[in-house]
Structures are given as structure tokens and as C-alpha cells.
Image: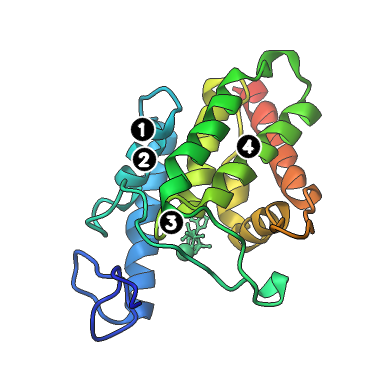
Amino acid sequence: MRDPYFYDDCDVLKNKMGIKDSAVLDLAEVEFACNAIHELAYAPLTGDYDFEHYCKMHFYIFRDLYDWAGIPRTVSMEKEEAILGYMSIEYAQPEEIAKQAEYVLERMNRRTWGKMDTSEQAEFLSQDMADLWKVHCFREGNTRVTITFVCQFADDHGMPIDRKLFEENAVYTRNALVAASAFFQNADFRKMEYLVKIVRDSLERGRTSQRRL
Ligand SMILES: Nc1ncnc2c1ncn2[C@@H]1O[C@H](COP(=O)(O)OP(=O)(O)OP(=O)(O)O)[C@@H](O)[C@H]1O
Ligand SMILES: [Mg+2]
């Protein structure tokens, strides 16, 4: 079946600007989404860190680009990952998205973050980030919304975090999320250490810069 998110005559996501060249759309996407992500660092989006809040954040970041911003995808999806030999992570089926995301978010909200040291915070934040990302709630933009959402959550829960590291190391971050989510129905190839490393570094930098203020 043809992906209904694509234009009928080309493999480009239907978008509000009518762009039909994927390279041009990528540029427009980076521009609009980055601006919104930077705004959110200064003006956090209110909410309870539940699924509704997560969708609201996707809407905020992608609202100028896609009609479906903030709306979970309605199709199954695969993305080839170079570091998995061009296999795809097993994302959630559309009908499972809300339930799986809510499960992760409820767990993240129940944790006693204030009782953990930075290493423990990095481990649990990485676990929650990877599990939320693995659902891949939206047709596009999952890495950006997940990183932004988890960083705002950390800031709001007494764990100041430096977001720049994720943005400046976007390829590393995405590969680290893939490595942390590489478990399949019949095999588990998960490696958490890359994600834990960048999350711990970001927490340490966040704490240091807060101390300087
Ligand atoms: N935390 C971030 N802040 C700003 N830009 C980012 C961030 N993470 C990724 N990007 C940029 O977003 C663009 C798209 O990246 P990518 O396709 O890996 O993520 P995504 O579209 O958010 O997630 P997915 O494709 O898995 O749904 C890249 O140009 C990347 O540099
Ligand atoms: Mg993408």
C-alpha cells in the first residue's frame, strides 16, 4: 500500500508549503523545527508529561510543516538503520502507540528522581528516552520531540540538562537511540552505554552551568 503521508506522485511527505523536493523539505524542516525547539528551551510547554503533553510538543515543533503535527501516525512504519545493517527497529503498530507511550510516561513520572545520583538519573532517563523513542509515535520527528520532551522533563524535575550536546551530536544521538532500542521479537542486541554516556555528560554540564549562575 502506498504511504498515505506521501504525495501521490512523489515519495515526499505532504507538507503545508507544498514542497515536493525532499532535500528542500529537509532544509525547511530543520529551519522551522530548530527554531521551535530553541523557543521551547526558554518557554517550556506546560503539561503533565503524559501522552497529551508529548503530542502537544510534537504539534508545537512541527505545526508549520505538517497537518498531522501532534497526531500519532496511522500507518505501520520501518526505517532502515545503517548501524543495524539496514534493518529497522521494530516500532509500535499504530493501534498500540498510545498504550505503549502512556506506559513509559507513567513509569517516568513515578520514579523518585530526587533520590538518585547523576549516574542513576542518566541510566533511568536513558531507559525512558529509548523506550519512548522506540514507540515512534509520529510519522516523522520522533527523535527531536523525544529529546526535547525528556530534556524539559529533566529540567522540571531538578535535573538541569544541557540540551546543546544532543543537537550538536544529532547523528550520534540517533544512533545511540537505535542501539538502545535494538531488541526484536526473537533477538536482543541492545547496547545502552552510548545513550547513557551522552545523557550523563549533558546532566553533568547542566549541573555545572547552573552552579555558575
Ligand atoms: N535534538 C535536536 N535538536 C535539533 N535538531 C535535531 C535534534 N536531533 C536531530 N536534529 C536534526 O533533525 C534532523 C532530522 O533528524 P532525524 O531524522 O534523525 O530525527 P527525527 O526526524 O526527529 O526522528 P525520526 O526520523 O526517527 O522520526 C537532522 O537534520 C538532525 O540534525
Ligand atoms: Mg527524520
Q: From the viewer's perspective, is 124 left or right of 162?
A: right
> Which is more N-terminal, label 4 or label 3?
4
Q: In the drawing, what numbered circle is on residue 52?
A: 1
Tell me which amino acid carries mark 2.
Answer: Cys
Q: From the viewer's perspective, is 204 left or right of 137?
A: right
Q: Which residue is mark 2?
A: 55
Residues packed near mark 4 inside 10 Å, few (<14), some (14 to 19) or many (20 plus): some
Q: Which residue is mark 4?
A: 128
Name the residue rendered at 26%, 50% in the picture: 63
Cβ of mark 1 under 8 Å from ligand 1: the answer is: no
Q: Which residue is mark 3?
A: 141
| Quarter-of-image position of residue 174 | bottom right
- Label 1, label 4: how far apart the Cα atoms are: 17 Å
1 and 2 marks in contact (CB < 8 Å):
yes
Residues packed near mark 2 inside 10 Å, few (<14), some (14 to 19) or many (20 plus): some
Name the residue rendered at 47%, 53% in the picture: 142
Task: Report the quarter where the N terminus lies.
Answer: bottom left
Name the residue rendered at 43%, 56% in the picture: 141
| Quarter-of-image position of residue 175 | bottom right
- Label 1, label 2: how far apart the Cα atoms are: 5 Å
- Label 2, label 3: how far apart the Cα atoms are: 11 Å
Element at label 1? helix
In the image, residue 73 lies at what x, y percent? 36, 55
